C-alpha cells in the first residue's frame, strides 16, 4: 500500500483500523510514506488543521481570533461537514519592538476539536461504485410471448443472503463464501421463476436488502458493530452482490415488469440501502422497473385484495404488527380480504396465524435463508435449518395461490 502511494489515513480506512495503530506499525517497521504530510493541512497563515478521518483538530494563534467560531471561520472549515465538539482558548502576553519602541501585545491560541457530521466521501470508492453501475448493461426485456394483462403477482423473496459471509465446513457443517452465495442466489431465482412460468403475471415483486450483505463497513462489522467472519474486501463483495441482483432482475423482467422494494436488515442497514439506490440509478430510464429505496423499516404493498407487510423481524414486537399494519397502511386495510407479514432474520421458515377480525386473520411468514451456518450460529446449535428461498404467487381476487421453494444448489 505504501509503495502504491497510500498514506497512513488511507491505509487505516482500507484495513478498517485506527490511524494510530497503522502509524505505530509503520514506526516499528521503520516505514515512511510520501503522503504523511497530507494528513496535516495548513489552511491559512497561523492555522493548523489536522484531519484524522472521523475527527479533526484546528489550532490558530493570532491577536484577533479569540473564539472557536472565529477560528473555524478564519480557517475556512466547511461547516457542512464538520461541527465543533469542544475547544480550548489560551492567552499570553508577548513583547514587541517597533523602531525602538517596546510594547506588550496579547496573543490568543484557540484549539478546536471537530467531529465529522457526514461520512467522509472516499473518492476511490465513489469512482469504483460508478464503474460497478456502468459495467452492468441492460436492454429492454423481450417477453417470451404476447400475454394479455396478467392477473397474478409473483413475489420472489431471497431473504438473508449474507453476501460476504465466510463459513468453513469442518467448523460449522457448511461451506459458504461470496462465490457460493452468488451461485445459490441466482440458481434459486432460476428455480423459482421456472416453477411459476405457467402463470399470467402482471408483475414480479422483488424485495432487496434483508441482510443481503453480511457486514456494513470496512471494519467487517454489522451495523451495530458486531464483528463477522468475511471472505473478501467490502468493495469486492458489494460489486459482486450488485451484479448478482442485477442478473436476478434481468431474469425476472423477461417474465413481467419488476417492482423492487428495499427492506433494511440489521447486518447491512447502510450497505443494503446503497445497493437499492444503485439499482435505482441503473434502471432510472427503464419503464418496466420501479425501485423503492426509501429507508423506512416497514413497507406495505397491496395487490388486488391482498395486503403484504415487510419488515426484517428484529425490530417491532410480533404482537404489534397487526396494529401497525392497520394504522400505517390504513388506506388499504378495509379494501382487502387477505393480510400477511413477511419477515426474515431467523434463517428458518415459520408460519404464525395471528388473531385478527372475525372474518380476517393476519398470517406472518418468517422466511428461510440460503446462507450457510457461520461459527456463532453453529456454536449455538442453529445448524439444522434448511437453506432455502421462497416465492409466493397471488391472485388479484383470490389471494395466495401458490408457494414455491428453491433449495441451495451449487450447480
Image (tube, helix red, strand yellow):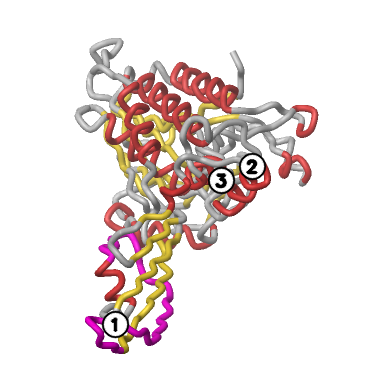
Pick whichever of labels 1 and 2 is earlier in the sequence.
2
Question: Of helix, strand and loop, which one carries label 2?
Answer: loop
* Residue that carries the numbered disc 2 in the rendered image: 30
- Which residue ends up furthest to the top in the rendered image? 145
Q: Residue at x 38, y 19 (%)?
A: 251
Q: Is residue 80 magenta?
A: yes
Give the image location of residue 40, x and y in percent: 41, 55
In this picture, residue 216 sits left or right of residue 258: right
Query: Mark 1 or mark 2, which is nearer to you?
Result: 1
Check the image and report above or below for 334 versus 137.
below
Sequence-wise first label, 2 or 3: 3
Residue farthest to the front?
Answer: 100
**Numbered circle sitting on residue 66:** none
Q: Which residues are magenta?
A: 75-103
The dominant secondary structure in magenta is: strand
Label 1 sits on a secondary structure element that is strand
Amino acid at each position: 500500500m505504501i509503495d502504491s502511494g497510500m498514506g497512513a489515513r488511507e491505509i487505516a480506512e482500507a484495513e478498517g483500523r485506527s490511524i494510530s495503530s497503522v502509524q505505530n506499525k509503520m514506526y516499528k517497521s521503520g516505514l515512511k510514506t510520501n503522503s504523511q504530510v497530507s494528513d496535516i493541512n495548513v489552511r491559512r497563515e497561523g492555522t493548523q488543521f489536522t484531519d484524522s478521518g472521523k475527527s479533526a483538530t484546528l489550532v490558530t494563534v493570532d491577536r484577533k481570533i479569540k473564539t472557536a467560531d472565529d477560528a473555524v471561520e478564519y480557517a475556512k472549515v466547511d461547516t457542512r461537514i464538520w461541527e465543533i465538539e469542544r475547544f480550548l482558548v489560551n492567552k499570553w502576553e508577548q513583547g514587541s519592538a517597533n523602531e525602538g519602541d517596546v510594547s506588550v501585545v496579547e496573543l490568543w491560541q484557540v484549539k478546536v476539536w471537530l467531529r465529522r457530521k457526514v461520512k467522509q466521501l472516499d473518492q476511490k470508492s465513489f469512482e469504483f461504485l460508478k464503474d460497478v453501475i456502468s459495467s452492468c448493461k441492460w436492454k429492454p426485456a423481450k417477453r417470451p410471448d404476447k400475454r394479455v394483462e396478467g392477473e397474478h403477482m409473483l413475489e420472489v423473496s431471497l431473504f438473508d443472503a449474507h453476501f460476504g459471509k465466510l463459513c468453513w465446513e469442518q467448523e460449522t457443517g457448511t461451506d459458504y463464501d461470496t462465490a457460493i452465495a452468488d451461485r445459490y442466489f441466482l440458481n434459486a431465482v432460476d428455480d423459482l421463476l421456472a416453477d411459476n412460468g405457467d402463470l399470467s403475471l402482471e408483475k414480479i415483486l422483488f424485495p432487496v436488502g434483508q441482510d443481503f450483505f453480511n457486514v456494513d463497513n470496512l471494519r467487517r462489522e454489522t451495523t451495530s458493530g458486531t464483528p463477522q467472519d468475511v471472505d473478501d474486501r467490502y468493495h469486492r463483495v458489494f460489486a459482486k452482490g450488485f451484479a448478482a441482483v442485477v442478473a436476478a432482475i434481468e431474469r425476472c423482467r423477461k417474465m413481467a415488469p419488476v417492482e423492487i422494494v428495499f427492506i433494511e436488515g440489521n447486518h447491512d442497514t447502510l450497505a443494503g440501502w446503497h445497493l437499492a439506490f444503485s439499482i435505482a440509478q441503473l434502471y432510472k430510464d427503464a419503464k418496466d422497473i420501479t425501485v423503492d429505496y426509501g429507508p423506512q423499516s416497514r413497507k406495505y404493498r397491496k395487490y388486488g385484495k391482498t395486503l403484504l407487510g415487510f419488515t426484517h423481524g428484529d425490530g417491532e414486537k410480533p404482537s404489534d404488527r397487526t396494529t401497525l399494519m392497520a394504522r400505517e397502511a390504513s388506506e388499504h386495510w378495509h379494501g382487502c380480504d387477505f393480510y400477511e407479514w413477511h419477515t426474515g432474520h431467523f434463517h428458518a421458515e415459520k408460519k404464525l396465524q395471528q388473531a385478527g377480525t372475525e372474518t380476517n386473520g393476519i398470517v406472518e411468514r418468517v422466511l428461510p435463508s440460503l446462507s450457510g451456518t457461520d461459527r456463532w450460529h453453529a456454536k449455538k446449535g442453529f445448524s439444522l435449518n434448511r437453506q432455502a428461498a421462497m416465492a409466493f404467487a397471488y391472485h388479484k381476487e383470490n389471494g395466495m395461490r401458490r408457494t414455491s421453494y428453491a433449495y441451495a444448489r451449487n450447480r
